[in-house]
Each structure stands twice: as structure tokens, then as C-alpha cells.
Amino acid sequence: MKRTALFTLILLLMTTTVSAQDYGQAATVRIWDNASAPHSNGLTGPEEEPEPWRLANTSTAELFLYPADTTRCGHTGLGVVICPGGGYGRLAIDHEGFQMAQWLAANGITAAVLKYRMPNGHPEVPLEDAVQALRIMMGLEAGATGFTADKVGIMGFSAGGHLAAYASTMGSTKPAFSILFYPVITSLPGHQGSFNNLLGKENRTPESDARYSLENQVTEQTPPALLLLSDDDTAVPPISSTRYYNALKEHGIEASMHIYPIGGHGWGFRDSFRYKAQWQQAVLDWLQRFAE
């Protein structure tokens, strides 16, 4: 095989177009794409999977639905929209997506993993995807009959945590609660890659950084939040979570925060995280207050 052909084959293997998205979901709801959504992110070309379970170049918003197992845990009446992380450049669809959804569903909570469109410098795009996902799961928009819930919250990881807090503070339809795993919240010090992708590196200004540093957007209408993070996280400094927590308390919003001694960033549902059992119990205990 000639070197050019071999190199082309390697590139094809490294960048696989996402065609069949089977993550064990019971149903998939297409929300909209760049042509039908209120705004476009300007991305063209096929959606990609540059490495296993990492989606990139997303230009179509979809929900992957996992119904609550009511035979094991009864009826909680809760639903959660899950926003995977990935620096607003890709989506970690496994340990911050469908694995979390399957665990929630097994515990009586309807889960919906949101494959949101990458902002590509258009910050309004992921927000409108998250708000529409919430409205669908609340039954305010068509598409999820049989999967809607009485109370719908939002969960996010890293940049997905920013999106979850973004919807909680600046969304036109707000969730009943939010669960934020090591979230990107503030710009400085913060995860610069996420803010560059959200706002566009060349378009960032002190004013835009302040606007999308979400501790500045908390009001009395922001829903309660549970924050979970590691003290030794160097990718997204813990100050993101502590600033958000302090802002919530300043506005009289219920909040709880768990800071684990070690674990770094991006552990999600991974078994390698030493405190997995502890965060799982913390989440279920905290959600109990919202259950019927």
C-alpha cells in the first residue's frame, strides 16, 4: 500500500462519521438542526467521532431517552436532562452521558442525554438546545410523550456543567434543580478552552467574559443546585464551584456542595474515582427532596 493511501486510511479510521448512534436508549428525539433551529453554529460537514465515545462537529441537537425503572424504585416523578462535557468542543457521551443516564433510570429517574450543538463562537446555540430539551421533557413541546416528568432538572459535567448552570440562570425556561459536576462557571481563573469555544477566541472581551461567568447571573429565580468536585482539579479550578455556591447563597437559593479530596477532573461515572459510591449516595439523597 502506498504511503499516501495508508495515511488516508489512518485518517479515516481516526475520524469516524457518526451515523448510527446507539447508546442503549429507548428512544431518540431530534430537537432541530442548524437549518431549523433559531440560530446556527455555522458548522458544516458531518458530525464526527474522533475517538470512541467523543462526538465532535455536532450540528444537530438530539435527546437520547432512558425511562425510569419504576419496578425497582417506585415513581419519583423526576426527570433529568444530562449535558456531557468536552470543553464546548466535543461531547464525552459515555461516562458523562449514557452511563449516567442508565444509572439514574435504574434509580427511578427518567433521564435524557442531550447531544447539544457545539457553540463554535455562538453562545446562544447550546443554551437554546438545553432550554428546548427541558421544555420537551416537561411536556411543553411535543416529542417525548411517555417520557416526560413532573419535575425536570438538569445535570452537567465540566463545560456541560456550564451549560446546565447557563440554563439555570439565563434560560427562558428553567429546570427544577441542577446537579453540577466539576462545572466550568467563571472565566478567570477558569477553563479558557471552554470560553474560547463558547465565545470565539477572537471575540472575547472583558464584558463577554463577565456576562458568561455565571456567578454573575444568579438571581432569586435560579433553581437549587448540588455541586460535586475534586479539590485537586487543575483543569477547572474549584473556585468555579465555590463562586457559584456563594452566589446562590447570597440570593437565598438552596445549595449543597461536596468537595472530594482527590480525583482531578472528568471522572464522571468512572469506577476509578475513589469516591464514586459517596457521590452516588449524595445525589440520590439530595434528589429525594424533589421526589413525590
Image: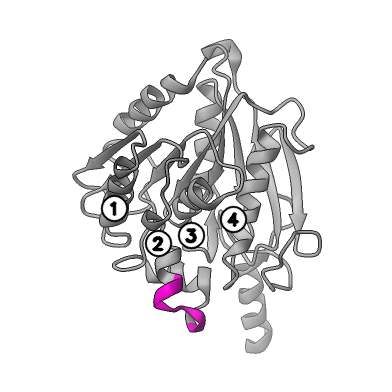
Residue named by callout 4:
127
Foreground tag (1 vs 3): 1
**Residue 37 x %, y %:** 75, 59
Foreground tag (3 vs 2): 2
Foreground tag (3 vs 4): 4
Task: Kindly indicate whether the residue at mark 2 contacts the one at mark 1 (C-beta within 8 angstroms).
Answer: yes
Name the kind of residue labelled 1 in the image.
Arg
- The reply, left or right, for residue 289 in relation to residue 259 is right
Image quadrant assignment for residue 75? top right
| Of callouts 1 and 3, the N-terminal one | 3
Badge 1 crowding class, 10 Å Cα cut-off, few under 14, some 14 to 19, many 20 or more, is some
Q: Which residue lies furthest to the left in this view?
A: 261
Residue at 26% of width from left, 54% of height from top?
238
Out of 173 and 228, give the one closest to the viewer: 173
Residue named by callout 2:
213
Name the kind of residue labelled 4 in the image.
Leu
Name the kind of residue labelled 2 in the image.
Ser
Residue named by callout 1:
243
| Of callouts 3 and 4, the N-terminal one | 3
In the displayed structure, 289 sits above or below 155; it is above
